Amino acid sequence: MRRLLLLAAGLLVSGAVAILAILPRVVEQRLNRVTGNVPEASERAKALAARSLLVDMHADSLLWGRDLSRRGTRGQVDVPRLIEGHVALQAFTIVTKAPRGLNFDVNKADAADDITALALVNLWPVQAWSSLLERALYQCGRFSKTVDASGGKLVWIRSRRDLDRYLDLRTRDPNITAGFLGIEGAHALDGNLDNLDRLFGAGVRMISPVHFFDNDLAGSAAGEHKGGLTESGRQLVRRMEEMGVLVDVAHASEAAVDGVLAIATKPLVASHTGVKGTCNNSRNLSDDHLRRIAAKSGLIAIAYFEQAVCGLDTRSIAKAVRHAVNVAGADAVGLGSDFDGAVQTAFDTTSVASVLDALLAEGLSEDDVAKIAGLNAIRVLRATLPAE
């Protein structure tokens, strides 16, 4: 009998291990789909991509269980694919909470959380099951391990000095890429502004006050109340600017964007957004906000997913970029895919040249496309990152 019980227990454990090995793959294949429905880029666009500094201001790749130092068969970003796509710099953004039943209209802050389930399935440390700060720090650690495992192919950017050294190195070896860390939603501070020091020490250099729900810092575009920046939120913005952490207004309510713009003294960014001028929903930026972000020398980074640009093709992305350029100027616009953010896209990071092709087809000059593709983002990072 004892042998039968031990055998049964062994089978149960083996079954659980098999499920845990398979389930993350199945979940990500469903959530981060690539349709492949994108035309091949022209030789002109491929050449432009190869000689440009391509920067993507947003990807949530650290959420998933993949080894990002190796080429994957699912998802949209990893180091080999970044290099193949000539992406010079990728923002790796950290998600710590996502309400169950997530939508773009109204989410409750106290709703059941999907990241808890993801943490359990992917065998995150026990302390990360309940602490949002620990979830952020765990993902920072994952990025550090990816840098180490890349064999020098992925360079970690934490300062202007890092950025300038990397760009110099890349002129001699284009078969490398770089990354920096951001966080979606300052609820990752676990309600304590002093935790900003811990996150900065772990390498975080961009934070948005909110994600898909309101918190004690600001209102979300998809929150219940959609309020403005609170006093704690204002303190956060000031401390971030002092430390050299880029302020990201993606997902912020209109009132919260107003609040950040009222006090920002450095360039800010909307790391992955659309524009109401081509896709009118509560998630996207108005023309007024486009102009005011540009007036702060900031960056409007256009995303690639359908809810941002009202289409699942490169033409929809290019139309959103064209509108933003018309309103805010070519110096204020960039790209922020939202790859691996539980979004379906037409392509992965190997095909960013197809986006450049669509921008050229919209009548933008090669000089302006090069700015949008990455030079504008580099400028903003140089203006905001700590010196060393």
Image (tube, helix red, strand yellow):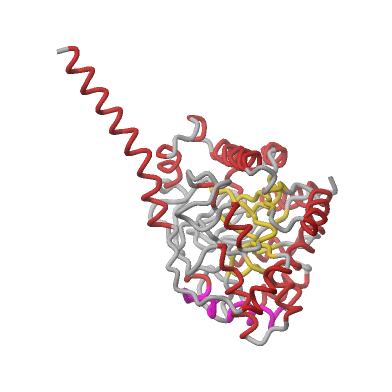
Left or right of 363? Residue 96 is left
In the image shown, does 125 or 68 lie closer to the viewer? 68
**Residue occupying the point 69% across, 36% down:** 198
Location of the N terminus by quadrant is top left
- The C terminus lies in which quarter of the figure? top right
Q: Tell me where residue 232 appears, x and y as whole percent.
A: 67, 48
Write the start and end of the magenta stretch as one range: 309-328
Q: Position of residue 138 (x, y in %)?
A: 57, 37
Q: Residue at x 48, y 66 (%)?
A: 345
Residue 228 located left or right of residue 165: left
Q: Residue furthest bottom?
A: 363
Q: Main secondary structure of the magenta part?
A: helix
**Res 33 → quadrant:** bottom left
Residue placed most toward the observer, 344 or 212 = 344
In the image, residue 139 lies at what x, y percent?
57, 41
- Residue at 78 percent across and 68 percent down: it is 297
Q: Nearer the viewer, residue 266 or 135?
A: 135
Task: Write down the quadrant of residue 119 in the picture.
Answer: top left
Q: Within the magenta stretch, is there residue 312?
A: yes
Outermost residue on the left side: it is: 1
Total tally of numbered discs in the picture: 0
One can see residue 191 in this view: no
Image-quadrant location for residue 336: bottom right
